Image: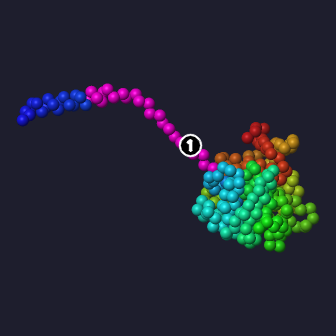
Amino acid sequence: MISSLQRKLIISFLSLIVLLIIYLIPTNINYQETSTYIDVKKNNVYLLNNDLLVQTEVISNKDDINDKILEIIDTLTINGSKKNYISKEFTPVIPANTKVLDLELKDKLLKINFSKEFNNADIKAIESLVYSLTELEEVDSIMLFVEGVKIDKIGDKIIPNVLNRDFGINKVYDITTLNNVYKATMYYYVNINDNFNVVPVTLFTNDNVNKVEIIVEKLKSAPIYQSNLMSFLANNAKLLDYEIEENKIRLEFENALLDNFFESELLEEVKYAISETLKSTIGVNEITFVLDNKEI
């Protein structure tokens, strides 16, 4: 039998061994912290929200350009395989069960051959296709076919042989005469669940909207019949001067671009709306903003 004293000695010895082992274990081990960065790819597409085609983002997992094109078309198709990736506030526009039979991309011209279901498409579907696909750097214009036959009409409306952004989107007609009709695509925002989504609106008017002053004035208020749209540009924002040189334009404003009750963070949204409108209307690529003699 082990005596009480022997038991205590054994316990003390074992405790000493454990402490010695702990002491000898190195404590300066460098643990390398690793993290994996996942670059989430997204496609900008134009889907319906309250009868307006609104820009929204949908997650993409494609790298090949042809696969990207097919993915975007699938996103735009009613009950397509991407429907679970689309927010409930947005509605696709291409008729259900439409299939892409084949496509060809050459020199930034995209030819798409659809199945017969595409015959039920409307103008909104065409606008959505054009604007969504030309978001891709590789695509400037598209041609549409149904089972090998070139589409030249949607319903009773004739469409161009080659479609690009000149076709327009969310068209608004503010004209009093058919003479001297001008066209410009203005960029606004709509508030959807506290997110500001881009809404391009092609305006037909008797005003010469190719003039920079007119563009700025038009952006100060929502287009006719679309009071829910906004550009955040202050009503008292005054364009003092502008200078166009090649594909660049310099805009000089006297007053703040934002109204006081708007967050200053929305300044980039204001600049974007003006920039995209000028790019689409007068063809410039670079816009510089000057306020109180300082570039912003």
User: Foreground: 189 or 7?
Assistant: 7
Which quadrant of the rendered structure holds the C terminus?
top right
Can the viewer see residue 221 in this picture?
Answer: no
Where residue 169 sits: x, y (%)?
Answer: 77, 61
Q: Amino acid at mark 1?
A: Tyr
Residue lying at 66% horizontally and 61% vertically, measured from the top left: 75
Where residue 82 sits: x, y (%)?
Answer: 62, 61
Residue lying at 63% horizontally and 67% vertically, measured from the top left: 79
Where residue 270 sits: x, y (%)?
Answer: 72, 50
In this rendering, position of residue 55 left or right of residue 154: left
User: Foreground: 229 or 7?
Assistant: 7
Instruction: Identify the colour scheme used.
Output: rainbow
Residue lying at 87% horizontally and 59% vertically, measured from the top left: 182
Please name the residue that numbered disc 1 is placed on.
Answer: 37
Can the viewer see residue 108 in this picture?
Answer: yes
In terms of secondary structure, what is the magenta stretch mainly?
Answer: loop
The local crowd at label 1, few if under 14, some if 14 to 19, many if 20 or more residues have their Cα within 10 Å, is: few
Q: Which residues are magenta?
A: 19-41
- Which quarter of the picture shows residue 81? bottom right
Q: Secondary structure at mark 1?
A: loop
Is 138 located above or below residue 88 in the figure?
above
Residue lying at 17% horizontally and 32% vertically, measured from the top left: 11
In this rendering, position of residue 46 left or right of residue 171: left
